Image (cartoon, rainbow, N blue to C red):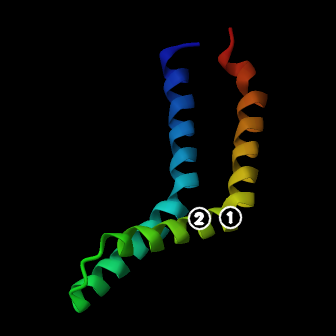
Amino acid sequence: MGPDQTVEIMRRVLIEAMLLSAPLLVAAALVSLAVSLLQTLTSVQEQTLTAVPRLVVVFVITVAVLPWMVHRLVGFTVRLFTDFHKYLG
């Protein structure tokens, strides 16, 4: 396996990791933005107010998109192992 093939595999792995983490990161960012805006408008600076809603939303989104994430990860693994013969030799 040459360096270009290794780079190709790592590129594909990083793309999959970004796609799998994107829904959770976007949801957490949107909730953080909304809570920060609410805190700014109401002048309430409670630390638990920022953490708890973000944790709840990330948990709910994780449960909602977990079947899609598992399906995508299994498909990626199957594609990687079926195409692995071209990286050997």
SS state under label 2: helix
Q: Nearer the viewer, residue 67 or 88?
A: 67
Residue 29: quarter of image: bottom left
Disc 1 residue type? Val
Report if the CB atoms under discs 1 and 2 are less than 8 Å apart: yes
Q: Which residue is mark 2?
A: 59
Using a 10 Å C-alpha cutoff, classify the residue at mark 1 as few (fewer than 14 neighbours), some (14 to 19) or many (20 or more): few
Q: Nearer the viewer, residue 13 or 89?
A: 13
Residue 47 at what x, y percent from top left?
Answer: 31, 70
Residue 71 at what x, y percent from top left?
Answer: 76, 52
Q: At 75% from the left edge and 45% from the top edge, which residue is drawn?
A: 75
Q: At 49% from the left edge and 26% from the top edge, which residue is drawn?
A: 7
Q: At 49% from the left edge and 70% from the top edge, which residue is drawn?
A: 27
Residue 73 at what x, y percent from top left?
Answer: 69, 45
Residue 51 at what x, y percent from top left?
Answer: 40, 67
- Circle number at residue 63: 1
Q: Residue furthest top?
A: 89
